[in-house]
Amino acid sequence: MPIDATLPYDDANIFARILRGEIPSTRVYEDEWAIAFHDIAPQAPTHILVIPRGPYVSWDDFSARASDAEIAGFVRAVGTVARRHGLVEPGYRLLANTGGHGGQEVAHLHVHLFGGTPLGPMLARSGG
């Protein structure tokens, strides 16, 4: 169910619980700014989620409230994960859903990295 990305942060969301170690995950990267782990329902041969350690609901919330160090650290973590998993060449998709219309389902900023196969167009094209 899509969420309202303007809601206050909910400390009980699944990614907050993963950060605290209450729910297991297959972590592939972590540093002081972010953790990355395999998605439990992958949509591509490589499907990794990268989340910041801070309590941010969405990309909008993160870009408005995070410190410059948190933003730089998170963006660098995403790039590091992509490089370490061989996604840069031949290419990958980076996706962050925000809010109900964007299809965001968990109220903690998360970025999807998809790769390992040609992914096709981002959105279905209309016949018009």
Image: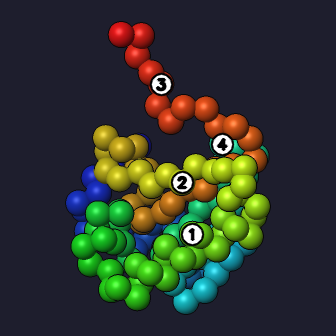
Q: Residue 38 has which mark?
A: none
Measuring 48% from the left and 63% from the top, which residue is drawn there?
110
Residue on which the image places disc 3: 124
Q: Which of marks 4 and 1 is in front?
A: 1
Disc 1 and disc 3 in contact, CB within 8 angstroms = no
Q: Distance between the residues labelled 2 and 1?
A: 9 Å
Amino acid type at circle 3 is Ala
Q: Earlier in the sequence, mark 3 or mark 2?
A: 2
Q: Which residue is drawn at 49% across and 76% down?
A: 74
- Upstream in sequence: badge 2 or badge 1: 1
Q: Is mark 4 on a helix, strand or loop?
A: loop
Instruction: Please identify the quarter of the rendering in which residue 44 is found.
Output: top right
Q: What element carries label 3?
A: loop
Q: Mark 4 points at which residue?
A: 43
Q: Which kind of residue does numbered mark 4 sit on?
A: Gln
Residue 53: tell me if it is visible.
Answer: no
Cα distance between the residues tagged 4 and 2 = 13 Å
- Is disc 4 in contact with disc 1, using a CB cutoff of under 8 Å? no
Compute the Cα span from label 3 to label 2.
17 Å
**Outermost residue toward the front in this view:** 89
Which of the two labelled residues, at mark 4 and mark 3, occupies the earlier sequence position?
A: 4
